[in-house]
Amino acid sequence: MQLSKNLKCMFFSDNSSSFFLKAMRMICVASLPMLLAHCAPSDQVNMLERRINSLSVENRSFSNQINLLKQEVAELKRVTQTVGKQDMATVRSRQAEFSNRMDELQAELLRLNGMIDQISHKSEQEEDATSLFREDLKKQIEDLKEEVKLLQASTKVTREVEQARKDAAQGAVDLYQQALDLIKQKEYKDAKETLRTYIEKHPHGDRVANAYFWTGECEYNIQRYEEAILEYQKVISRYPKSNKVPDSLLKQGMAFAELEDRESAKIVFNKLIKSYPKSPQATVAKNKLGRL
């Protein structure tokens, strides 16, 4: 009877509390994948779950072994109530084996729990790194948005400048054409003022050389020959590649002839014939030379 009490104390005092602790650990292990699923980065959840599930399987295996040991202990209790003193040595040997095996299982459970803690810590570190990466990526996206805004603003300004340039060019064409229309109407004074306005507003325009020539024409038609000669000279000296140079030379020679400066007229006509021998203006200049 005393032996039975001793066995009860040996198997149901310390070991009972140990079983409860192990059961609690296994419950924690079973719930660990759900906890890690919330803290681990999304691209690592599957890997961690597989690893923890593997550990959980090992834990369940150890738990099953412990349950088997408990059953054997219960069987031993029953046996001790019927066996005699001659079998106690065998019972104690079995008891020692069970105790050693349970110690081994306890150590293995501690090792597995340590590995789970390491995985959790590594997951937290990787989550921190992922968080930093996301913050950096967010900053890069914000910077790109700012660059896009600046580019859009620059594009808008460029379009406005281009439109203003087109408007100015169209205004220049309109002003130039207005002067030509005035010349056709023989409104030479108004035409001259309009051409001067065009030149002032568009000093680098495509029709500046022409504008100087037509200004000379206005002066010529109102018999201001000296002023006409000066306007023609601007075309000749400033725009030597202009197609208005032959016309300017011809009209300049004619203006000198009108002033009865025949020598200057001859010089200009000869220059025209030499520089543009096949031009219609050169033919007219030859005829003019024959009359001087």
Image: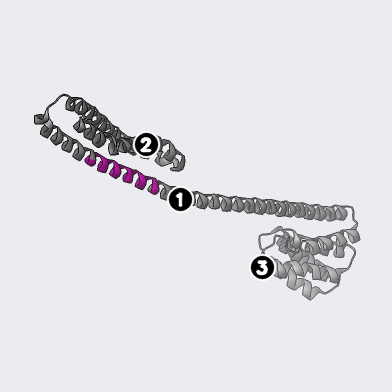
- Where is residue 78? Give x, y as percent: 20, 25
Pick the residue in front: 74 or 114.
74
Whether the magenta-drawn stretch holds residue 133 is answered as no
In the current view of this chain or complex, which residue is farthest to the left? 86
Dot 3 or dot 1: first in sequence order is 1
Residue 19 in the image: x percent, y percent? Answer: 31, 35
Question: Mark 1 highlights which residue?
Answer: 128
Name the main secondary structure of what is drawn in magenta: helix
Q: Quadrant of residue 86?
A: top left
Element class at badge 3: helix
Residue stretch in magenta: 103-121
Dot 3 and dot 2 residues touching (CB under 8 Å) = no
Q: Which residue is drawn at 87% across and 58% down?
A: 191
Q: Nearer the viewer, residue 42 or 85?
A: 85
Q: Counting other residues with Cα less than 10 Å from the Cα at mark 3, is it few (<14), some (14-19), or many (20 or more)? A: few
Q: Which one is in front in this view, the residue at disc 3 or the one at disc 1?
A: 1
First reached walking from the N terminus: tag 1 or tag 2:
2
> Mark 3–mark 1 contact, CB under 8 Å?
no
The amino acid type of the residue labelled 1 equals Asp
The residue positioned 73% from the left and 51% from the top of the image is: 163
Q: Distance between the residues labelled 3 and 1?
A: 87 Å
| Residue drawn at (11%, 34%) of the image | 89
**How far apart are the alpha carbons under marks 1 and 2?**
30 Å
State the residue in front, 51 or 145. Answer: 51
Work out whether residue 167 or residue 89 is closer to the camera in this orientation and state it: 89
Q: Name the residue under label 3.
A: 274
Camera-nearest label, 1 or 2 = 2
Q: Residue 292: in sight, yes or no?
A: no
Q: Is residue 276 above or below residue 184?
A: below
Kindly identify the amino acid type of the residue bearing the numbered disc 2.
Answer: Met
User: Pointers 1 and 2 in contact (CB under 8 A)?
Assistant: no
